Image: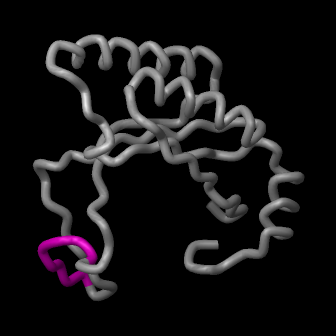
């Protein structure tokens, strides 16, 4: 389904056949404004939520974009150009992917991560692709 647009009905039908969906919970770097002296607590709290997700069996993977390594664009012929898409906002920040039974469950986990990270989280669902 990469590159194809799917209808809402298709997405709903695919979720009926596959009740567990993968959700991306993320935030851009600029959203995380933490006062000095609180970074240790933020790290501890965020890792605690991730440990709970692992224990619950819903954790897929997570991490952050290494902003010290600049992006490159790779063309179909293998050519490499410095930088990302000039027209797109930069991709940075932290990401967690969880596999959950419902959007409500995803919202609940996103709220826990938001509390731990001290910033709002974006929530997105991955479309199901039976070939992946």
State which quadrant residue 107 falls in.
top right
In the picture, measured across the screen, residue 5 lies left or right of residue 80, that is: right
83 in the magenta segment: yes
- Which image quarter is the C terminus in? bottom right
State which quadrant residue 86 falls in.
bottom left
Q: Position of residue 74 (x, y in %)?
A: 26, 77
- For this rendering, which residue is in front, 93 or 35? 35
- Which image quarter is the N terminus in? bottom right
Q: Position of residue 26 (x, y in %)?
A: 44, 44
Residue shown at 15% from the left, 79% from the top? 81
In the picture, measured across the screen, residue 84 lies left or right of residue 59, that is: left
- For this rendering, which residue is in front, 122 or 11? 122
Q: Position of residue 67 (x, y in %)?
A: 17, 49
Magenta residues, start to end: 78-85
- For this rendering, which residue is in front, 41 or 68? 41
Q: Position of residue 60 (x, y in %)?
A: 54, 36
Residue shown at 70% from the left, 36% from the top? 100
Residue shown at 52% from the left, 40% from the top? 97
Where is 9 relative to 56, above or below? below
Residue shown at 85% from the left, 69% from the top? 9
Q: Main secondary structure of the magenta part?
A: loop
Q: How many marks?
A: 0
46 in the magenta segment: no
Question: Residue lying farthest bottom?
Answer: 77
């Amino acid at each position: 389904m990469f590159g194809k647009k799917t209808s809402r009905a298709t997405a709903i039908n695919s979720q009926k056949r596959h009740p567990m969906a993968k959700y991306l919970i993320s935030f851009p770097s600029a959203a995380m404004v933490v006062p000095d002296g609180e970074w240790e607590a933020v790290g501890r709290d965020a890792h605690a939520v991730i440990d709970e997700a692992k224990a619950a069996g819903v954790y897929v993977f997570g991490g952050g974009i290494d902003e010290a390594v600049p992006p490159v664009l790779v063309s179909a012929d293998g050519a490499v150009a410095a930088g990302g898409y000039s027209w797109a906002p930069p991709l940075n920040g932290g990401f967690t992917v969880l596999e959950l039974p419902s959007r409500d469950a995803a919202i609940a986990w996103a709220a826990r991560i938001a509390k731990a990270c001290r910033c709002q989280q974006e929530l997105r669902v991955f479309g199901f692709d039976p070939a992946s």
